[in-house]
Image: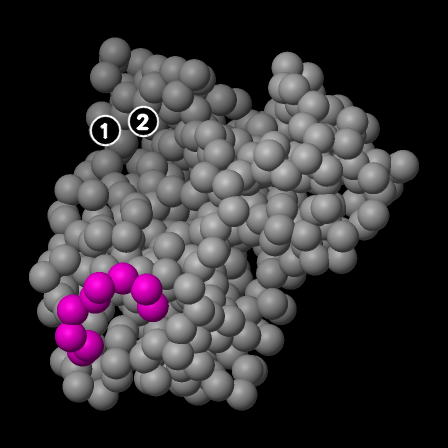
Amino acid sequence: MTYAISGDCCADASCVAVCPMNCIHPSPGEPGFGTTDGLFIDPRTCIDCGACADICPVDAAKPADRSSAVDVQLNASYYKERPVLDGLDLDTWEPPRFDRWSDGPRRVVVVGAGPAGMYATRELLQRSTAEVTVFDRLPVVGGLARYGVAPDHPVTKQIVETFERIVAHPRVRWRPSTSVSVDDLEGRYDAVVHASGAYQSRRLGIPGELAADEIVAWYNNRPGARRPDLKGPRAVVVGNGNVALDLARLLTSFQGPDRFTEVVVLGRRGPESAAYTASAYREVEHTKGIALRYNTTPVAWDGRALTTADGDTIAADTLITAIGFTGRPIPGLPFDETRGVVPNDRGAVIGKPGHFVTGWIKRGAQGGIGVNKACAQETVRTLLTADVPQPA
């Protein structure tokens, strides 16, 4: 019996490293990694060893007889037009890479305990002898993995348990509920890794709109989050990514006097430009009360109806925008306002020696939880092996 990977895949890619047959793709560096609907197991070469299931942090890898028929079919379909790779022939694997292990810096600080910060901390622990201090303004680790994943996706949230083990490492000093500035850190550490994320919602600028980050924080019980002013029974969610579909699904699940009976998910471009994954679409495809509409640009909302650029109106008691996230400037570091990132070269902050970035604040708000692993590996490799300037 072969294995299959489900739609709960976080693209952490730990399974790729342990697979003895090189049958899990797309792997980091291959086309499609971070943009496809997770990873897939080739049933033609899988030997049923179970190594992927043992290491998967979200239990997405399962024997085919315990997986849904849809997941089994999706895994097989990914390889339908691809040649069979001989896992025993090392020439079919990616070229070997011998990363230099280094004593490196003795004291490193990581600012942010979300996925990017946790993966960076793990890389530092594995590839150096550094003591790592981790700061986060929240009282717990996890960041968007804890407070950004839909609450009805508990399997994906399991990865937080991995992050909790990282901060419990004897070489990690965990400093929760603590905000620090660049000035606070100058001269105290050999290197600083900023992993502050990009959790601020982009907005359309329509008066009265609710931003996705407000609602996501509230329904995940993030500390300090308040209940947004949600009014039913009709809502419009502008956006064509996973967050927009999650919001629509959760709104229609609400019970009580403010329940939503109709949610229109509005894409400003066509379905060919949709950013949601196939698994997210399958969750709403047959959900009563949810309609997807494309090629529609909203221009105004009066509290009862949304007016579009072509003059149509759509009934809406609530307007929500879920059109992506952007990073916030970090005082003391350069910032690209257009991209919402800190300018960097493979993670090294340009013009600020000793400072590094990883995650969404490095590359922009794209890619799921697991994609941060490869991103952090690049940053830590730069920190430990490149000709970096003088420390902070």
x, y percent for residue 185:
21, 82
The residue drawn where x is 32% and y is 64% is: 385
Q: Are marks 1 and 2 in contact (CB under 8 Å)?
A: yes
Query: What numbered label is drawn on residue 300?
Result: 1
Quadrant (top left, top right, bottom left, bottom right) of the N terminus:
top right
Query: Considering depth in this image, is 261 or 99 the residue closer to the camera?
Result: 99
Q: In which quarter of the image is residue 75?
A: top right
How far apart marks 1 and 2 lie (CA) works out to 6 Å
The residue drawn where x is 23% and y is 60% is: 348
User: What secondary structure is marked by label 1?
Assistant: strand
From what the image shows, is residue 346 above or below residue 281?
below
From what the image shows, is residue 386 above or below residue 37?
below
Q: In this view, does 179 lie to the left or right of 378?
A: left
Q: Quadrant of residue 274?
A: top left
Residue type, mark 2 in image: Leu
The overriding secondary structure of the stretch rendered in magenta is loop
x, y percent for residue 382:
31, 60
User: What secondary structure is marked by label 2?
Assistant: strand
Q: How is the image coloured?
A: one colour
Residue 124 on the magenta span? no
The magenta region covers 384-392
x, y percent for residue 355:
22, 68
From what the image shows, is residue 149 above or below residue 264?
below
Query: Considering depth in this image, is 256 or 79 the residue closer to the camera?
Result: 79
Residue type, mark 1 in image: Ala
Query: Considering depth in this image, is 188 or 213 the residue closer to the camera?
Result: 188
Quadrant (top left, top right, bottom left, bottom right) of the C terminus:
bottom left
Disc 2 crowd, CA 10 A, few/some/many (<14, 14-19, 20+): many
